[in-house]
Image (tube, rainbow, N blue to C red):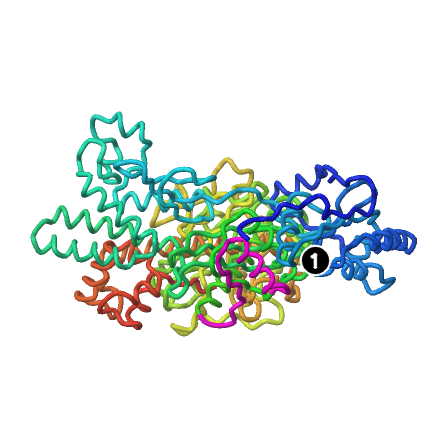
Amino acid sequence: MTGRRPIDPPEIAFAREDQATPAPESDEMEAADEAGLLIVDAIDAPPPGAESLASGRDAIIRAVKHAPAGPGVYRMIAADSTVLYVGKAKSIRKRVLSYTRPVGHTNRIARMIAATASMEFVSTRTESEALLLEANLVKQLKPRFNVLLRDDKSFPYILITADHVAPQITKHRGARNRPGDYYGPFASVWAVDRTINALERAFLLRSCSDSYYENRTRPCLLHQIKRCAGPCTGEVSHTDYAELVREARAFLSGRSRAIKEELALEMEAASQELEFERAARLRDRLAALSAVQGSQGINPRGVEEADVFACHQQGGATCVEVFFFRTGQNWGNRAYYPRADRSLSEAEVLGAFLAQFYEDKPCPRLILLSHKVEEQALLAEALSEKTGHRIEIAAPQRGEKRDLVDHALQNAREALARTLAESATQTKLLEGVAATFGLKAPPQRIEVYDNSHIMGTNAVGGMIVAGPEGFRKSQYRKFNIKSADIVPGDDFGMMREVLRRRFSRLLKEAPREGAGEGAADGGGEAAGGVVQGVEPAAPHVMPGLVEDIPAEPAVPTPVEASPSSAEPDAPPDSDPEEADALPDATEASPWPDLVLIDGGLGQLNAARTVLDELGITDVPLVGIAKGLDREAGREQFFLPGRTPFRMEPRDPVLYFIQRLRDEAHRFAIGSHRARRKKDITEAGLQAIAGVGPTRKRALLRHFGTLKAIERASLADLEQVAGINAATAKAVYDYFHERSPG
């Protein structure tokens, strides 16, 4: 079967005379959908009364008389003709009879039964056909008690046309009515644009329209900046341009490694023939190809074509993260937030999500899941019938496929955490922060501090600022650690230097009255410098014992939904060498209402000691220590004079504080990378242990540029001729340090 079979009218059995029509959706539901997250709290609603439950059971009992015994789809309908639920069954009669039991139903099912006034049934030939029909009806009718995928957008593709003597590369969405080769799907237009830009630099294909091409009399700007070969004005022959098109198609079809080897050989030959300009052009093309793969994050070796789904639930909401792998390359990912009752498990939501997802989208030959769904075999059979080729659905437990699922699951956790944090207003979050930490009023200025270094080298401290309007990136500051007395790896000493420089200058240029009065109930402590019941922080730690953590991805500001970036946003008024300046003078007060320190008791004691030395006792300090196994959601908070505590894992305030901490991670790590990159530029790759002139040439020959080497994954580095696993790891670790917090 290549599509859905039309349902003939005689196969439809009605439990009542009038035809049910779906009621319009509420404004509240539409508003929640626009926000990207809708939590259905049916499980928290009170259970239905005995009278209403009996009324619904009676309606279902009447409907059973008309229920067919074979496979099909049933609809439960309310008194106002609203479709409550769409389900499928191998035997409709048996499934409907299960709703007539007087007891044994979950709260969600009981409420669904109580609201039912009538039912409708549709017979199908097979259970797999019933599954596809169910997915189609759920998307059309949007029943209240079903899992809903509220997304009608099609995926973008890359198209290399075949109806012109000089093929064009362009993005495409919609029906494939133009001759050519389509590559995709990509997760977003942004991913397509990024890839096309890199492919233009690598293969010099034109992206202009045919009409623009025909009217050119001289090369355009894209040719001048080496992003087009210029076939429109004869800058390249049609034969040579066809070879560029062949290479581009081969790269997008999965032969990326072969194409890179061809370019590397051509570059080597041009260099030996002293054709250095041609060698430089080939080097730039090679670097562009490395940039395409480097920006993709993870490129599996043993998975040619697959979609990877990972489902995560938190705080009553569900996120399904989807990664698209085609021709062995990662072509992007997208997060979905299906509307689902919070009583449903992750596996139940994922199973319902899949059928709807592929109702109008192309299906790969392999689908990898984070959870084994109940009707996995049936879903694979239905999708196989729909597409005309075998579809495999698996929930891998080990190996590379499991690594892909774990990677998607981590992205689902992070995406849902960010969405939950954004679901509450900034004001309510700040009020929650004040209540949690005993502040007298919601903080108007929060400062978060973190350090970043590798074994003490290129040590940088970072300060980020947040307030009611979100992150104030123009007021971020970085501190290059200068003290010669600090032992490499002494994270406490680094924090003391950062805070001493910050608050010494603040006292000098913006003194305020009443600095000794407590600004928080229990948040301050008299001079003495050490948290009660805690030993003073050790003055030094042994080099190499600083605990590292993975670099967290950048998150958008609470008021800006900008894409994440691994590099910091450099403050426009920052001196790269001395950036401990004061905030903008336009702010009412440059003094923080709350200071968050990334670290536990030791870091908090180091910060408290510095403020006590400066006579500052009214600035609330909070230390954030990671939980067991560094698990997000189990952070422990330390305040002077208070017993350490944890927040509820689903508390929006906790997500908000995690975002602040992650932003401080991002900024400190990015500042450290910028400083280290400057050292690498001056010292070269030989600064990396184990990399000499021979291996340096091998790396540059393979990747083209230093930037491409920096972006390369560990697996890509291990593929370089002459680079063993230990050296590849040394190179990768040098460019991908971790923050110690």
Residue 379 belongs to magenta span: yes
Instruction: Give residue 221's position: percent from left, percent from top.
Output: 25, 32
Q: What segment carries the magenta color?
A: 373-399
Task: Give the vertical position of 260 relative to 401 (above or below).
Answer: above
Q: Which residue extends farthest right?
A: 51
Instruction: Give residue 389's position: percent from left, percent from top.
Output: 48, 58
Q: Quadrant of residue 571?
A: top left
Instruction: Give residue 563's position: percent from left, percent from top.
Output: 46, 46
Residue at 58 percent across and 57 percent down: it is 382
Q: Quadrant of residue 351?
A: bottom right
Residue at 9 percent across and 56 percent down: it is 272
Q: Quadrant of residue 647?
A: bottom right
Q: Which residue is mark 1?
A: 71
State the SS at label 1.
loop
Residue 266 seen from this side: yes
Tell me if 65 is positioned left or right of 512 in this view.
right
Q: Which residue extends farthest left?
A: 273
Instruction: Give residue 306's position: percent from left, percent from top.
Output: 46, 59
Front-lying residue, 308 or 434? 308
Task: Give the vertical position of 358 relative to 366 (above or below).
Answer: above
Amino acid type, mark 1: Pro
Give the class, few, some or many, for how many residues have Cα within 10 Å of label 1's Cα (few <14, many ≥20). Answer: many
Front-lying residue, 1 or 38? 1
Front-lying residue, 560 or 290? 290
Tell me if 110 is positioned left or right of 279 in this view.
right
Residue at 84 percent across and 56 percent down: it is 47
